[in-house]
Image (tube, helix red, strand yellow):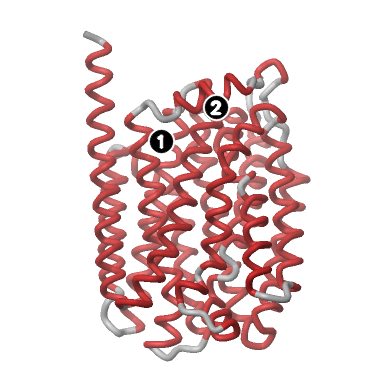
C-alpha cells in the first residue's frame, strides 16, 4: 500500500499540531520563572524546577511508553498523550502551592512523553524511510513554533493576567491543537501481527544501543538540548534583572524560534548536500558561537546570539533525529526513538537545572563556558561515532 499525497499532508499537519501542543505545554512556565521565584521565594535553580521536573519525568517515562506503543499501537499513544497533557495544562493554574505544581508538572511530563517517544517510529511506519526526513522536519517545526508561541503567550499575558492566567492561555491554545491531532492523524501501518512481545521489546532495546552512529545521535540529543535549555532557563533572569527589561519585552527572545522552525525544516536538505556528519558538527559549533555572542551586556548582541543559537540547535536536532530514525534497526524503531527522546529530555532536565545553578552562583559568562564544553563534546561524539560506524562496516565486508 502506497502513501498518497493527501495522507502525507495529513500526517505532517497532525504531527506538527501534536508537536505544538507538547512543546507549548512543556516549556510554558519558562518565561515566568522570575515571577515564580518572586512569589515562592526561590533562587534561579529552584524556580527552574518548574521546567526540569516535567522534562525529567518525560525522560524517565519515554522508554516504557515507547515499549507500550509496540503493544497497543503508536496512534493510540500519541492521541492519549496530547489530550491528557492539554487537560493537565488547564489544571496547572489551580495549584495551591509550588510543591503541588511540581507534582502536577511531573505528571504532565509523563503524559507528554507519549508523543515524542513514539512519533518518529510512527512516521517511519506510515511514510517509510524515504519520506520520514521531511515529516520529521515538519514535526520539529511544529515543536519550535509551539515552543515559541507558548513562551510568547505566557510572557505577554503574565503582566496583565499573572502567571496563572498566562498558563491558562497556553493550555487553551494547546487543547485546540490536540483536537486537530485527534481528528487528522491517520492510523499507522503497524498491524496486530507486527506488534512486539515484551521479549521482543527488550531485544530491540539492546539493538538500539549497539550501533556507534546511534550512540552519537543520543549524545547530540543530550548535550545540545542541555545547552539550549540551560541558556533559555537563565535568559529570563538575565534579561529582566541584569538588562532591566520588562517580562513582555524579555519574552521577545523566543521569537528566535520562528527562524528555528525554518532551519529545522531545511536542515536535512543541507545534510544531503554536504553530508550529515559535516552538517551536524557545523551546527553544534555554530551553537557555541551563538552562545558566545550573548556575553556582552547588549540587548542587540543577546538577540543576535539567541537567533544563531536557536537556528543552529534546531538544525542539529532535525539532522540527528532523522539520522537516528534512518539508522534504527527494523526491530527497534520504537526503542531507538525512545532512547533519542530519553537523552533529549534528560539533557533538558539536567542541563536546564545545572545551567540555572551555574548562572545563579557564577554568572552568565561561566554558563556560556560550560555550554561551550558540552557542545564541543557533542561534536566530538559525532566524529568518533561515525568513524567507528565506517570501520565496523569495513570489517563486516572483509
Residue 146, visible in the rendered structure: no
Image-quadrant location for residue 237: bottom left
Q: Which mark is residue 128?
A: 2
Is 24 situated above or below 199?
below
What whole-number distance in Å separates the C-alpha atoms at marks 2 and 1?
Answer: 13 Å
Front-most of residues 172 and 242: 242
Point 68% across, 42% down: residue: 78
Contact check, label 2 and label 1, Cβ < 8 Å: no
Name the outermost residue toward the front.
Answer: 99
Front-most of residues 90 and 54: 54
Point 26% across, 20% down: residue: 392
Q: Is 199 on the left-hand or right-hand side of 211? A: right
Task: Where is residue 96? Give x, y as percent.
Answer: 73, 76
Which circle's residue, 2 or 1, is located before the other in the chain? 2
Mark 2 or 1: in front is: 1
Name the outermost residue toward the top.
Answer: 398
- Packing grade of label 2 (10 A; few <14, some 14-19, many >=20) is some
Point 31% across, 45% down: residue: 280
**Residue receiving disc 1:** 323
Task: Where is residue 242? Give x, y as percent.
Answer: 37, 87
Is 226 situated above or below 208?
below
Number of labelled discs? Answer: 2
| Secondary structure of the residue carrying numbered label 1 | helix
Name the outermost residue toward the bottom.
Answer: 244
Image-quadrant location for residue 38: bottom right
Q: Which mark is residue 108?
A: none
Is 141 situated above or below 335?
below
Task: Where is residue 185? Give x, y as percent.
Answer: 71, 41
Q: The N terminus appears in which quarter of the rendering?
A: top right
Task: Where is residue 196? Give x, y as percent.
Answer: 63, 21
Q: Is 60 on the left-hand or right-hand side of 327? A: right
Residue 27, visible in the rendered structure: yes
Amino acid at each position: 500500500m502506497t502513501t498518497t499525497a493527501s495522507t502525507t499532508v495529513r500526517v505532517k499537519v497532525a504531527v506538527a499540531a501534536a508537536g505544538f501542543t507538547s512543546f507549548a505545554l512543556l516549556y510554558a512556565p519558562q518565561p515566568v520563572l522570575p515571577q515564580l521565584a518572586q512569589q515562592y521565594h526561590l533562587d534561579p535553580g529552584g524556580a527552574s524546577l518548574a521546567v526540569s521536573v516535567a522534562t525529567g519525568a518525560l525522560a524517565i517515562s519515554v522508554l516504557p511508553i515507547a515499549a507500550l506503543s509496540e503493544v497497543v499501537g503508536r496512534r493510540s499513544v500519541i492521541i492519549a498523550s496530547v489530550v491528557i497533557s492539554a487537560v493537565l495544562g488547564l489544571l496547572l493554574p489551580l495549584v495551591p502551592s509550588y510543591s503541588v505544581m511540581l507534582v502536577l508538572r511531573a505528571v504532565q511530563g509523563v503524559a507528554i512523553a507519549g508523543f515524542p517517544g513514539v512519533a518518529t517510529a510512527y512516521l517511519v511506519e506510515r511514510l517509510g524511510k524515504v519520506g520520514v526526513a521531511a515529516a520529521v522536519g515538519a514535526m520539529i517545526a511544529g515543536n519550535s513554533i509551539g515552543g515559541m508561541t507558548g513562551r510568547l503567550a505566557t510572557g505577554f499575558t503574565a503582566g496583565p493576567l499573572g502567571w496563572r492566567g498566562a498558563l491558562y492561555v497556553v493550555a487553551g491554545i494547546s487543547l485546540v491543537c490536540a483536537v486537530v491531532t485527534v481528528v487528522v492523524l491517520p492510523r499507522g501501518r503497524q498491524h496486530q501481527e507486527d506488534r512486539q512481545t515484551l521479549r521482543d521489546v527488550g531485544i530491540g532495546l539492546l539493538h538500539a544501543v549497539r550501533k556507534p552512529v546511534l550512540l552519537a545521535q543520543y549524545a547530540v540529543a543530550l548535550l545540545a538540548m542541555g545547552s539550549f535549555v540551560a541558556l533559555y532557563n537563565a535568559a529570563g533572569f538575565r534579561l529582566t534583572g541584569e538588562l532591566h527589561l520588562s517580562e513582555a519585552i524579555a519574552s521577545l527572545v523566543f521569537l528566535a524560534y520562528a527562524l528555528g522552525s525554518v532551519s529545522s525544516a531545511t536542515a536535512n536538505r543541507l545534510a544531503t548536500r554536504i553530508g550529515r556528519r559535516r552538517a551536524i558538527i557545523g551546527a553544534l559549533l555554530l551553537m557555541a558561537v551563538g552562545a558566545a555572542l550573548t556575553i556582552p551586556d547588549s540587548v542587540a548582541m543577546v538577540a543576535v546570539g539567541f537567533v544563531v543559537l536557536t537556528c543552529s540547535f534546531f538544525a542539529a536536532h532535525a539532522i540527528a533525529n532523522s539520522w537516528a530514525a534512518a539508522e534504527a534497526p527494523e526491530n527497534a524503531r520504537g526503542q531507538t526513538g525512545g532512547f533519542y527522546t530519553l537523552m533529549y529530555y534528560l539533557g533538558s532536565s539536567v542541563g536546564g537545572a545545572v545551567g540555572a545553578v551555574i548562572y545563579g552562583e557564577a554568572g552568565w559568562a561561566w554558563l556560556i563556558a560550560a555550554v561551550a564544553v558540552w557542545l564541543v563534546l557533542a561534536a566530538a561524539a559525532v566524529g568518533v561515532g561515525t568513524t567507528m560506524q565506517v570501520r565496523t562496516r569495513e570489517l563486516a565486508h572483509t
